Image (spheres, rainbow, N blue to C red):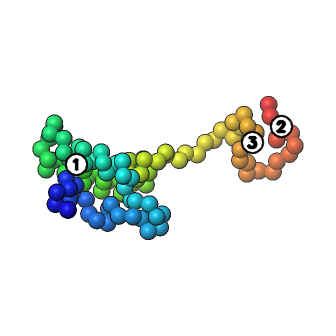
Amino acid sequence: MPSDPQFGVLEESQVKINPLAGRPKIFSDVLEEMCRYLVDEIGEDKSIKMDKKKKTVREAELDPVAQRTVIKLKFISFVTLELNRRKGLVFHYGKMTWSDATLT
């Protein structure tokens, strides 16, 4: 709809439901904040804000970490090298003996 401040800024393919996940490609809270940013009178001109919004979404689509954190508001996954986290051994590749399994 032309009355929507975000109309024409993002493509339909960027805001529709992801068919594999069944969830929106961009989280609704993120879209609302983008809309507030565009409508806000303080700061740059509206055309500059639109260009920034397009650029941010385009860059986030290319980076999987940015997709999860910026567009979908999910936590970053990380791998730890700390195997014993006071809950017992979390993961182990080698052969394990009984003495390795005891907590220290």
- Residue position for label 2: 102
User: Which comes before the other along the chain, label 3 or label 1?
Assistant: 1
**Mark 2 and mark 1: span between their CA atoms?**
54 Å
Residue at 87% over, 43% down: 98
Residue at which label 1 appears = 52
Q: Earlier in the sequence, mark 2 or mark 1?
A: 1
Is 76 rendered above or below residue 12?
above
Q: CA distance from mark 3 to mark 1?
A: 46 Å
Q: Amino acid at mark 2?
A: Thr
Query: Quick check: can you spot residue 3?
Result: yes
Three-letter residue code for mark 3: Leu
Q: Amino acid at mark 1?
A: Lys
Quarter of the view holding residue 44: top left
Neighbour tally class for label 2: few under 14, some 14-19, many 20 plus, Cα within 10 Å: few
Residue displayed at 49% across by 46% down:
76
Residue bearing mark 3: 89
Rate crowding at label 1 as few (under 14), some (14 to 19) or many (20 or more) other CA atoms within 10 Å.
few
Real-space Cα separation, disc 2 to disc 3, in angstroms: 9 Å
Q: Residue 65: tell me if it is visible.
A: no
Where, quadrant-wise, is the C terminus in this rendering? Answer: top right
